[in-house]
Image (cartoon, helix red, strand yellow):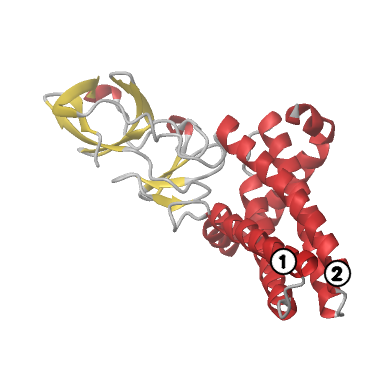
C-alpha cells in the first residue's frame, strides 16, 4: 500500500536524488569528505538514525509535558517546552540533511519511492514543529500545542514508513552481515595464479561465497565481492591507490582489511587472508 502511494511521485524522488548528487559532485573533494561525515562512514553506523532518535524521543517527551500543561494545568513548563521543541527542530534539520545525503544513493524503484515519501512526510512534520516553536516564542502556547501535536502525528507516520524502508528493503544496513561465508582454518585454492591479472579486480568463488581478488606482484588482497552498502559488484569496480571503489555509489574500501575509506558505506567489507602458493591463489578466513 505504501508503495502505491509513493509511485506517482517517482519523478520527484529521482529529481531530488539527482540534485543531491549534483551538489556533492560540484563540491569536489570537500563535498566527498562532508558526505562521509553525514553518511556516518567514520561512525560505522548511519548518522541519520542517531539523529532521528533525538527528534522522535525529544518530541515524545515534549508531547507528554505539553499534555500535562494543557489538560491538567501543570504550570511552569512553558519555557522548558519552548526550548525543548527548539532542540527538536535543530535535530530535525540535521535529520533532513543526513537523510538527503543517504537518499541520493538509494536504488531506483520502490525503495527510492518509499524513502522519498518517508522524507517528505518528515519534512512536513519538522515544519510544523518549527511553527509551534515560533508560536510559543510569541506566547501562543495553546495554539502551539495543537500545531505541535499535529506535527507529532505526522512525524509518527513518517517514522513508521522509515521502519518499512529499513526492514523491507534493507536500506542503509550492512549487506554482508549474514554472508561472511565459511570460517576456513586451512588455506583453500580458489584460482590459478596465472588467471589473476595484475591490478585487475577479479571475481572468484570461495565455497558459496563470491570474492573479489586483487593482485599486486606476489601480494593478493581478497574481499567479499558484493558491497556492504547496497550489494554492488566490486569486481566491476576501480582501484584507487590501496582501495577498491564500488561502481554503484562509489564507496571505497581498503584492500588490506576492508575498512571503509569513503562512504556511503558505513560497514567494513568482509576481508580474507590470501596468498599465492604453488601456482594457486589460496584463501583463508574471513578475517575477524
- Residue 123: x and y in percent read 76, 54
Q: Label 1 neighbourhood size at 10 Å, few (<14), some (14-19), many (20+)? A: some
User: Seen in the image, is 229 located left or right of residue 116?
Assistant: left
User: Seen in the image, is 143 located left or right of residue 235?
Assistant: right
Residue pointed to by mark 2: 142
Quadrant of the rendered image containing residue 227: top left
| For discs 1 and 2, the disc positioned in front in the rendered view | 1
Q: State whether residue 17 appears in this view.
A: no
| Residue for point 32% across, 18% down | 208
Tag 2's secondary structure? helix
- Residue 250: x and y in percent read 53, 44
Residue pointed to by mark 1: 68
> Are the two marked residues, 1 and 2, in contact with CB atoms closer than 8 angstroms?
no
- Residue 6: x and y in percent read 78, 33
- Residue 201: x and y in percent read 39, 33
Q: Label 2 neighbourhood size at 10 Å, few (<14), some (14-19), many (20+)? A: some
User: Seen in the image, is 200 located left or right of residue 229?
Assistant: left
| Residue for point 65% across, 52% down | 99
Task: State the separation of the CA atoms marked 1 and 2.
Answer: 12 Å
Amino acid at each position: 500500500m505504501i508503495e502505491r502511494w509513493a509511485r506517482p511521485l517517482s519523478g520527484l524522488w529521482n529529481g531530488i536524488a539527482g540534485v543531491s548528487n549534483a551538489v556533492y559532485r560540484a563540491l569536489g573533494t570537500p563535498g566527498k569528505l562532508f558526505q562521509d561525515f553525514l553518511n556516518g562512514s567514520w561512525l560505522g553506523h548511519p548518522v541519520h538514525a542517531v539523529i532521528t532518535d533525538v527528534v522522535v524521543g525529544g518530541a515524545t517527551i515534549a508531547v507528554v509535558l505539553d499534555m500535562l500543561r494543557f489538560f491538567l494545568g501543570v504550570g511552569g513548563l512553558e519555557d522548558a517546552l519552548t526550548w525543548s521543541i527548539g532542540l527538536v527542530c535543530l535535530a530535525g534539520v540535521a535529520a533532513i540533511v543526513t537523510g538527503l545525503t543517504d537518499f541520493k544513493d538509494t536504488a531506483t524503484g520502490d525503495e527510492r519511492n518509499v524513502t522519498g515519501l518517508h522524507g517528505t512526510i518528515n519534512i512536513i512534520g519538522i515544519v510544523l514543529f518549527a511553527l509551534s516553536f515560533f508560536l510559543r516564542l510569541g506566547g501562543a502556547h495553546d495554539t502551539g500545542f495543537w500545531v505541535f501535536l499535529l506535527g507529532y502525528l505526522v512525524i509518527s507516520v513518517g517514522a513508521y514508513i522509515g521502519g518499512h524502508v529499513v526492514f523491507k528493503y534493507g536500506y542503509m544496513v550492512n549487506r554482508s552481515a549474514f554472508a561472511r561465508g565459511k570460517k576456513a582454518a586451512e588455506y583453500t585454492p580458489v584460482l590459478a595464479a596465472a588467471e589473476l591479472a595484475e591490478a585487475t579486480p577479479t571475481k572468484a568463488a570461495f565455497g558459496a561465497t563470491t570474492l573479489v581478488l586483487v593482485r599486486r606482484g606476489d601480494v593478493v588482497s581478497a574481499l567479499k565481492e558484493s558491497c556492504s552498502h547496497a550489494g554492488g559488484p566490486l569486481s566491476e569496480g576501480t582501484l584507487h591507490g590501496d582501495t577498491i571503489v564500488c561502481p554503484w555509489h562509489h564507496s571505497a574500501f581498503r584492500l588490506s582489511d576492508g575498512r571503509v575509506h569513503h562512504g556511503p558505506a558505513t560497514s567494513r567489507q568482509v576481508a580474507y587472508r590470501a596468498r599465492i602458493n604453488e601456482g594457486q591463489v589460496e584463501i583463508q578466513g574471513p578475517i575477524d
